[in-house]
Each structure stands twice: as structure tokens, then as C-alpha cells.
Image (cartoon, coloured by chain):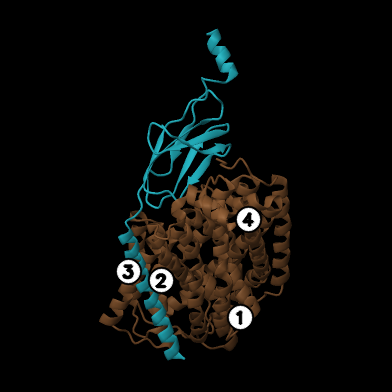
């Protein structure tokens, strides 16, 4: 009990780990937001594999969220922890980036062009006739 | 939860700037509004606004917090096409130019876009249109109230709710004092602040960071932002164009200006405003692409614009951005409050509840509605449910469905009521479905496309033969002066 009290008083290993969450599990436009709940500065790591064998430091600081964008297709894993040396890692969050098929994109583009040109035509033709 | 812990400005500085500019807008609002005694003076600035003020108010009103904050957000999310696509919002201004001229000619005594729909298509179409228009107006107001809170929080750390409350309170205050005359006058000053501020920030951003550095860092950290074949951003292009067209075509913000401009001014004012507005979102959006080069953490996408400006330019830049975006917010919130209150007073209060209301009673009702809108907006802003762009584009499904009923209604005799009603209802539904099924970046496009099909199909299957002279309706206040009854006609529902 004495040892536990000393550890608690020093505010180390018994401190609650950071909780990390993402605003989506599947990002179809390559962007998403990560949020974490911590009272101190944290470091945030990204990895293409769940074992974090080659992690990349994405952010270190006191903010509480980060927007990831411009990501290519793939699975991305994230974890965070306070910047103290002995701090525990948070839960791992996985986000899958899966962009829309390019054919769908061009289909919508073509549809938009038709609607725009049709609207422009009815206005210019109508304005000329009325003038 | 306050997600920014690294704000650049001291909260005291933030409060001082807000207080100074709030006092300025209130003073200008009182000064310009003191001669607005008659209803037409209060709600339509006496129908005598000239080209310079007309251009400035159209441009300033269209430079909203969304231009200065959602454009960078879209650049951060959608990349290069997000930035360029946002500037396609200027197409709405260009396309409205011939409509403004036609509206002024067909409805010299008109007050609202609702008047047009009622006279052109009848009561059912009019009520559907009012629902859409009021929903959009509220959505826009909420997006700007939120933007005010977000901006102030991003730059100063002042809690979101405080900043949002201040901005809404000040805009309600000076709009109440002076009506549309005050709105247009302050727009002119706000337009000058916005344009000069943006130019300074963009020039300094390129000098401080450098184009090569911006490009290299974006490619390394957020590569898809530079990919011109990123699917979502391609889908976004015409969606944003049609969203802008829908916003402008249907909203009483723009119709009230068409009625307020002197005869012959509307066409040129809208064309010029489009030319002046188009580069602004490109400049604002470009700034966001510098985030990787600066090593800046962006906690929420709609914060990126002010955070980048503050990072590059330091305290001076943060002050400049705060002033500029406060001006952009004010110029749009006041316009929305004024135009929405006219719509509610004319189309709901007078037409549905008090047909014999005098001009004085309507003026009093307008003031009460401005306050009521401010309170309702505050209530909806408080929970901060989503980001700016996603809220705004949610309304896109609805407003884009009004493009064809309005454009065809103004120029096609054969456009009929069934087509207009179906276009708005089915178009909105289809757009809403696609918002959730695909993404916010296709909702307006789908809404406009389905609406167009409905209007065209109905017009060819059962063509109407509308007489455009039926749109020349006298307002009851004019009838009282002339002693003649109004011309109330149009296609029945």
C-alpha cells in the first residue's frame, strides 16, 4: 500500500492512458480527424502495419486533435501517448483510406457539365429572346 | 472541448479587436440607417443603390466566412481542385447578372424571391420554396455563427461560445439599427478590408515560405492533395459550381439586392462582383497548402486558414486575419439577417397571418424577426455539430433543386407548376440521399440534375403559357399611396 501511494503521488505508471479515436473508419476522400483525450502534451505515431514496426512521428504537442488529409489508399494505424518517457500507449486506431473509383468521379463530372451547360443555355437564349 | 492549446494571440488582444470593430459597425449602422424611415428604405434601401455600392455589397456578401475559412478547409481536404473548385462559386454571380436585370424589369415593385415563386407557380410551389429558402438561410447563418466562434478560438484561445455570441450579437445590433441601407454601407467598408487583407497575407505567405517548399512538403506529407485525378475533388468541381448557382438564384439575399439596385445597375454589378470575387478563394485556399511546409498541426480542417496566416505572419498577421474574417462574417450575417427577415415578414407574416398589416407594423415585425433569427442561430450554433463545409453543403441538396424552377420560370413561358414543385421536392430528396450515400461533394449536383429533369419533362408533357405581365404586382403600401387595388394573379396551384 505504501508503494502504491508513492507511485500515485508521483503521477506515473498508474495514470490513465490516453484515449484515441478517429471520426471515421473508412475515408473515401483521403481525409479524417484524429482526437485524443489527455491533459498533457502527447506524441502521435502513424504506421502502415498494426505492430508499429516502422512508426512515423506525426505530431508532438499540446493540441487535442489532428486532421490527416491527402492520404493514399491503404490501411493506417495510429497510437498516442504522453511525452513522458514511461507513459503507456493509447488504444490503436485503424483508418482505411479507400478513394472513390475514378469512373464514378468522371461520371459525376459529366453530369455536372450537362446540368451547367443546360442552365447556361436556357438563360442566355431566354435573355437574348426577351431583349 | 477546446482543441487548440497553442493560440497565437493573447485573449485580451482578441477582446480588444472585437470591441473596437463592433463599435465601428454599430456606429456605421446607426449612421447609415438613421434616414431609413419608410419600409422600402429599411428593407430595400429605397431601391436606389448605384453601381459602386452595388458591386461592393454583392462581392462582400459573397465573401463569407466560408470563402476565407471553408475555402482553405477544402484545399486541405480536397487539394488543388478543392481550391480552384471553390472559386467556381463566382459562376453563380455571373449567371445571376442577366437574372437580376430580368427580375427588375418583370417585378419593379417586388420584394422577395418568394413573391416571384408565388406569382409564377402558385401557393403550393411557394410554400415548398419557402421551406427550402428558410432552411438554407438558417444553415448559412449557423455556419457563419460557428465560423466566428471557431476563428476567435483558433487565433486567441477564447472559448468558442464566447466568440460566437459576440459576433451574432453585434450583427443583430447594427442590422436592427439600420436595415438594408446599413448592411450595404458597412459591406463597402468590409469589402475593402477583406480585399486588402487577403492580398497582404498571400504575398507574405509566398515570400515567407516559397512555392517550391510548399510543393515539396505537401507532396511528402499529403500527396493526394496535389493529385489532379483525386476522385472526390473531381466530383466536387461541378457540385460546388451548382451549389453556388443554387444559393444565389434562390436566396432572398440576392433578390433583395436586385430590387434595391437602381434600374440598369444589377447586370453590371453582379458581373463585376463575380470578377472581383473569383480570385479570393484561390488565394485563401492556397494558404492552406502551406500547412505541411510549416509543420503546423491542424486540429480541425475549418481552422486551417486563420492558423496558417497567424503562423506565417505572427501576431500582426493574426490580428489582420481576425479583422478580415470578422469583416467577412459581419458582411454576410447582416445580409442574411436583413434578407431573411424580409422574406419572413412578407411571405409568412403578411401573406399568411396579417394581410392588412400597415408598413409601420411590418417594420416592427421585421425588427422582431431579426432578433428572433439571432437567438435561433445561437441555439443551433451552440452544440457545434459538424464542420463548416459539411454543414454548408448539406443545404446544397435543397438549394440546387431550385435552380431550374427559377431560371426556367423567368425565361420559359412553358415551365409549369408541377415541374417546379416536383423539381424542388424530388431534387432535394435525391440530393439528400447522395449526401449520405456518396459524400457532401455531390449533393448539390444530384439535386440540380434531378430537378432539371423534372422541370424539362413537365414543361414538354404539359406546357404552360404563362403571361409574364402577371408578375407586376403592386405592394399594399404602394396601393395605399395610389388608392388602387393590387394585381394579385398568377398560375393557381
Single out the residue that lies furthest toward the left: B461
Image quadrant occupied by the N terminus of chain B: top right
Q: Label 1 neighbourhood size at 10 Å, few (<14), some (14-19), many (20+)?
A: many
Can you identify the residue that label 2 sits on? B402
User: Does residue B65 lie above or below B478 as drawn?
Assistant: above
Q: Position of residue B261 (x, y in %)?
A: 59, 80
According to the picture, the residue beneath numbered tag 1 turns out to be B47
Q: Which mark is residue B430?
A: none
Sequence-earlier tag: 4 or 2 = 4
**Foreground residue, B211 or B326?**
B211
Secondary structure under the numbered disc 1 in the rendered image: helix
Q: Nearer the viewer, mark 1 or mark 4?
A: 4
- In this image, B4 relative to A90: left or right? right
Q: Which quadrant is the C terminus of chain B positioned in?
A: bottom left
Q: Quadrant of residue B286?
A: bottom right
Q: Secondary structure at mark 4?
A: helix
Can you tell which chain is drawn cyan? A
**Residue bearing mark 4:** B167
Identify the chain of the residue marked 2, using the numbered disc in the image. Answer: B
In the rendered image, the vertical position of residue B58 relative to residue B466, given as above or below: above
Label 2 and label 1: CA atoms lie apart by: 26 Å
- Mark nearest the camera among 1 and 3 is 3
Amino acid at each position: 500500500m505504501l508503494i502504491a501511494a508513492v507511485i500515485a503521488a508521483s503521477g506515473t505508471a498508474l495514470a490513465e492512458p490516453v484515449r484515441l479515436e478517429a471520426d471515421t473508419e473508412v475515408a473515401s476522400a483521403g481525409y479524417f480527424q484524429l482526437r485524443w483525450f489527455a491533459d498533457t502534451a502527447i506524441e502521435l505515431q502513424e504506421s502502415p502495419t498494426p505492430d508499429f514496426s516502422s512508426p512515423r512521428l506525426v505530431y508532438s504537442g499540446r493540441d487535442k486533435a489532428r486532421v490527416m488529409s491527402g492520404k493514399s489508399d491503404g490501411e493506417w494505424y495510429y497510437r498516442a501517448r504522453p511525452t513522458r518517457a514511461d507513459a503507456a500507449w493509447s488504444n490503436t486506431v485503424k483508418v482505411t483510406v479507400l478513394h472513390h473509383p475514378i469512373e464514378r468521379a468522371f461520371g459525376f463530372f459529366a453530369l455536372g457539365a450537362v446540368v451547367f451547360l443546360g442552365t447556361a443555355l436556357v438563360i442566355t437564349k431566354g435573355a437574348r429572346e426577351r431583349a | 472541448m477546446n482543441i487548440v492549446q497553442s493560440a497565437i494571440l493573447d485573449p485580451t488582444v482578441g477582446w480588444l479587436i472585437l470591441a473596437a470593430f463592433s463599435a465601428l459597425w454599430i456606429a456605421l449602422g446607426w449612421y447609415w440607417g438613421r434616414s431609413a424611415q419608410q419600409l422600402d428604405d429599411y428593407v430595400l434601401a429605397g431601391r436606389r443603390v448605384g453601381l459602386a455600392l452595388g458591386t461592393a455589397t454583392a462581392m462582400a456578401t459573397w465573401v463569407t466566412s466560408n470563402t476565407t475559412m471553408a475555402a482553405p478547409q477544402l484545399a486541405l481536404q480536397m487539394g488543388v481542385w478543392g481550391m480552384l473548385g471553390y472559386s467556381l462559386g463566382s459562376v453563380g454571380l455571373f449567371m445571376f447578372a442577366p437574372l437580376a436585370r430580368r427580375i427588375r424589369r418583370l417585378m419593379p415593385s417586388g420584394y422577395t424571391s418568394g413573391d416571384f415563386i408565388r406569382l409564377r407557380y402558385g401557393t403550393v410551389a411557394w410554400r415548398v420554396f419557402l421551406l427550402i429558402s428558410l432552411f438554407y438561410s438558417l444553415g448559412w447563418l449557423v455556419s457563419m455563427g460557428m465560423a466566428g466562434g471557431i476563428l476567435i478560438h483558433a487565433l486567441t484561445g477564447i472559448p468558442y461560445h464566447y466568440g460566437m455570441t459576440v459576433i451574432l450579437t453585434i450583427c443583430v445590433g447594427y442590422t436592427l439599427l439600420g436595415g438594408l441601407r446599413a448592411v450595404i454601407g458597412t459591406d463597402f467598408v468590409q469589402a475593402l478590408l477583406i480585399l486588402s487583407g487577403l492580398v497582404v497575407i498571400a504575398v507574405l505567405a509566398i515570400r515567407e515560405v516559397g512555392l517550391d517548399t510548399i510543393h515539396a512538403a505537401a507532396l511528402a506529407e499529403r500527396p493526394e492533395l496535389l493529385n489532379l485525378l483525386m476522385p472526390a475533388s473531381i466530383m466536387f468541381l461541378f457540385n460546388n459550381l451548382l451549389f453556388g448557382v443554387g444559393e444565389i438564384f434562390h436566396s432572398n439575399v440576392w433578390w433583395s439586392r436586385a430590387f434595391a439596385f437602381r434600374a440598369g445597375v444589377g447586370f453590371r454589378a453582379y458581373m463585376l462582383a463575380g470578377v472581383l470575387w473569383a480570385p479570393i478563394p484561390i488565394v485563401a485556399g492556397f494558404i492552406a497548402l502551406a500547412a505541411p511546409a510549416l509543420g503546423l498541426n491542424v486540429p480541425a480542417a475549418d481552422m486551417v486558414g486563420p492558423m496558417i496566416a497567424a503562423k506565417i505572419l505572427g501576431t500582426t498577421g493574426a490580428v489582420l486575419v481576425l479583422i478580415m474574417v470578422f469583416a467577412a462574417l459581419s458582411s454576410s450575417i447582416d445580409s442574411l439577417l436583413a434578407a431573411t427577415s424580409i422574406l419572413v415578414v412578407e411571405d409568412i407574416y403578411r401573406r399568411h397571418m396579417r394581410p392588412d398589416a400597415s408598413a409601420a407594423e411590418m417594420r416592427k415585425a421585421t425588427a422582431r424577426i431579426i432578433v428572433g433569427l439571432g437567438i435561433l442561430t445561437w441555439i443551433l450554433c451552440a452544440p457545434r455539430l459538424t464542420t463548416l463545409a459539411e454543414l454548408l453543403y448539406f443545404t446544397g441538396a435543397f438549394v440546387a433543386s431550385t435552380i431550374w424552377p427559377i431560371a426556367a420560370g423567368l425565361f420559359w413561358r412553358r415551365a409549369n407548376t408541377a415541374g417546379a414543385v416536383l423539381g424542388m421536392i424530388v431534387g432535394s430528396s435525391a440530393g439528400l440521399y447522395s449526401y449520405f450515400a456518396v459524400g457532401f461533394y455531390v449533393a448539390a449536383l444530384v439535386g440540380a440534375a434531378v430537378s432539371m429533369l423534372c422541370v424539362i419533362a413537365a414543361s414538354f408533357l404539359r406546357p404552360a403559357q404563362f403571361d409574364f405581365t402577371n408578375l407586376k404586382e403592386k405592394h399594399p403600401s404602394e396601393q395605399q399611396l395610389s388608392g388602387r387595388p393590387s394585381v394579385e394573379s398568377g398560375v393557381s396551384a
